[in-house]
Each structure stands twice: as structure tokens, then as C-alpha cells.
Image (spheres, coloured by chain):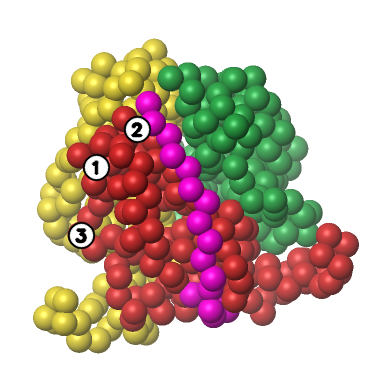
Chain colours: A red, B yellow, C green
Amino acid sequence: MRIKLEKLEVQTRGDKELVDVTPEVERVVRESGVQNGVVNVLTMHTSSGIVVTEGLPCLEMDVLNHLETLAPDDGDYYHNRYLDIDGRLGFNAGSHLKSILGGISAFFPIEDGQIVKGGRQRIYFAEYDGPLCRTYCVQVIGE
Amino acid sequence: MRIKLEKLEVQTRGDKELVDVTPEVERVVRESGVQNGVVNVLTMHTSSGIVVTEGLPCLEMDVLNHLETLAPDDGDYYHNRYLDIDGRLGFNAGSHLKSILGGISAFFPIEDGQIVKGGRQRIYFAEYDGPLCRTYCVQVIGE
Amino acid sequence: MRIKLEKLEVQTRGDKELVDVTPEVERVVRESGVQNGVVNVLTMHTSSGIVVTEGLPCLEMDVLNHLETLAPDDGDYYHNRYLDIDGRLGFNAGSHLKSILGGISAFFPIEDGQIVKGGRQRIYFAEYDGPLCRTYCVQVIGE
């Protein structure tokens, strides 16, 4: 049984942004030497996510815009109050809600050293509260 | 460590449809011989999903209708433009959004050769852009 | 390869409630003795979920309120009919929809015997149809 875990950083540039991390996930799988198993991808932050969709800029915009429609930043939230933990007003409830709706993780099988995924499936780190330096995990388990 | 991966096809009949694939998932687990471990289920398409809910036709309709309410096919999307990759207009942004909201995967533990799941939990392949011949993966990992 | 599965009960007190089960998940990981691997968390019910977000009471309220906005209990659903399986009217379509939108599972890597998660990530059992005695699974796989 082989297990490899990498904690990767991504510097986001926008307030909302989908960053295609598929090449990084593929690299970790390749370097792990695992031939058959699974790869797990997970964000470490509650105002970001992991999203799988087709790799088209127009669709990336639709995903971010639609999550904003479903969970707007300027909604009326309890979180919009002074928070001791941060020493400031909470302001990003909409980001947390987007994270829950869009999901925080993904997994794919590995077969013969390759990630098994659909030809149009791309793996995105989803920033909902940037720009920030973010951390996500890629873990390979198999043999 | 045993790993078994099956790529299964499902021919959907409707534009939107929930297909109960629980028996297929159970069959793969049984044939794998794995006594303890996990079973992963994952769609290979960005306009479909994997949904777990109670196995009632009325509820299946509610799930599809509600996702249509939250991410309507006829919304105003950037994806509604000419796409070189397809040689035609993008038209299914709503399907991609439903896929993200409803989720694309599920997993369940395996104990004593049986899937551990609630008595009312059924595993569905969710078609949001049919009818099409679709592929999903069932992977068993354990011993 | 070590595999440990625990089925845990939680008695919810409200109709809608987020119960922080992080300490229970950490306990199962610790007692498993697994040093490197993955921990899976999964609800056994179709009207509840597993949600990961920041551990703040104001945000917990926002999550539950927002899911109610997106999938209201008093919507017009097909499920609102007499159900032979229950011997009564279906009334909780909104709860099932919240379960799908919020998700029913989560996983985290384990490294050096510790769960790898962000400092603000808490793991919640999400009750959407309580109060009830509920079951969820925590499974550790690794070595």
C-alpha cells in the first residue's frame, strides 16, 4: 500500500476565481508511482472549494456567477457581525455558503498509473474570497 | 489490498432522469470479493451527476424539478455562445450547474462484504442533459 | 492495511441543527492507530447531511437558513402525498433537497496519526428533519 500526500499552494488573483489544478493533480499521481488506487483532492479553507466541470472560460464564469446568484456576498447574514476570532466584522458568509454548495473535495480512480476521468472533466480550485494564498491537498492511495 | 474498477454504461431515456444504479454498485462490490473497505461511485461527464436520496418516484421528480429551479436550462449564461470545441452553440450551462450543485460522486463503506448504507439511501446516476449513453465508474478498494 | 468502521449515533434536538462531530471523528482516527491514510464521514439518512464549515454559531445559523431559502420545507413538491411506505403523507421533500445540496459525506487525509484539515474546518452532522436519533459512519483506512 502506497500513500502520498502533498499540500499545495495556489495564489489566487481575483475575488472569485476557478483555477484549473488538473496538471498538479496529474503530477502528484505520476510521481507517487501508484498504478491502481484513488486520488483525493481537498481544499483546506471554508471559503473556497474544489469543483469539477468542463474546461471552458465561459463556463467558469457561469459557475462563479451562478454561485453568486444562489449565495450572494451581500445577503443578510448573521455572520455579518463583530467576530472576536478575527478582530473584525464577519463579511464573507456568502463565500462560506458557496463553498458548501459547490463542494470542497473530489476524488478519481487511478488505473495503470493514469487518472480515470471523463475527457471533459477538469479539476478546479475554487476561490470565493480572494485574492489569497491558499492550500489544498492531493492524496494518492493505492499500490 | 484489493482494487477493482468497473466502467459501466447507462443509456438514459429522458432529458432529465434519475437512474437507480444501486443494484449495479452492489454487484460490483459482491464480485470484487472485498470484505472490508470502501466503494466509490463517480460520473465521467460534466453534465450529469451521482445523487443519493430515498427511492421514491415522487421524490425523484422533486429533485430534478428543484435543480431546474435552482439552475434553469434557459438561464442567461456565457456558455450560450459558439464553441469551437463542439462546432456549435453551447446550450447546456444549466446541466453543468446542476452537476455541480447535485454532486458528481458518492462513497460508502463496505463491511463483511456488504455496502454500509441507510435503509432508504439509493444511489442514482443523474442525467441532466440526455438522452445519452453515459459512463460512470464503480471502484472497490479494500481487503 | 488497517480499516476501522464505527457507526455513531447522534440525538438531534432541533428541526434543523448543525452538530459539530469533529471530536468524535478525531477520536475514531486516534483509536484506529492509523498513521497515514484517510478518514471518511457519511450520514446514513436521506434527510440529513455532513457539512464542513467554520465553527461559528452565527455561520451555523446562516447555513441552515440559507438551505431553507434554497430548498424550503413548504415548497410545492410531488413528495407531499400519501406514501404507502410510511403510512402517512410525505412532508419532508425540503429536507431531502437540503441533504443533496449540502452534501452527505466528507473525507480528510490522515498524516502522522492526525487529521489533515484547515484550522477553521469543522465537521458537522447536519439535521434537516429532526429532532431524531441519527446514525453516521466514520471509517478510517490506512496503515
The image position of residue B77, as x and y in percent, is: 35, 82
Residue in the image at 23% along x and 34% along y: B5
Q: Are marks 2 and 3 on the same chain?
A: yes
Q: Which residue is mark 3?
A: A119
Q: Amino acid at mark 1?
A: Gly
Q: Which residue is mark 1?
A: A113
Say what secondary structure mark 3 lies in: loop
Of the two numbered discs 2 and 3 on the same chain, state the one appearing first in sequence. 3
- Indicate the quadrant where residue B107 lies: top left
Q: Which residue is mark 2?
A: A142
Q: Is residue C85 left or right of residue C23?
A: left
Residues in magenta, as a range = A1-17
The image position of residue C94, as x and y in percent, is: 53, 53
Looking at the image, can residue B78 be seen?
Answer: yes
- Measured in 3D between alpha carbons, the distance from the residue under mark 3 to the one under mark 1, in whole angstroms, is 16 Å
- Measured in 3D between alpha carbons, the distance from the residue under mark 2 to the one under mark 1, in whole angstroms, is 10 Å
Depth check: A16 or C129 in front?
A16
Q: Amino acid at mark 3?
A: Gly
Q: Is residue B63 left or right of residue A67?
A: left
Viewer-nearest of labels 2 and 3?
2
Residue in the image at 31% along x and 30% along y: A143
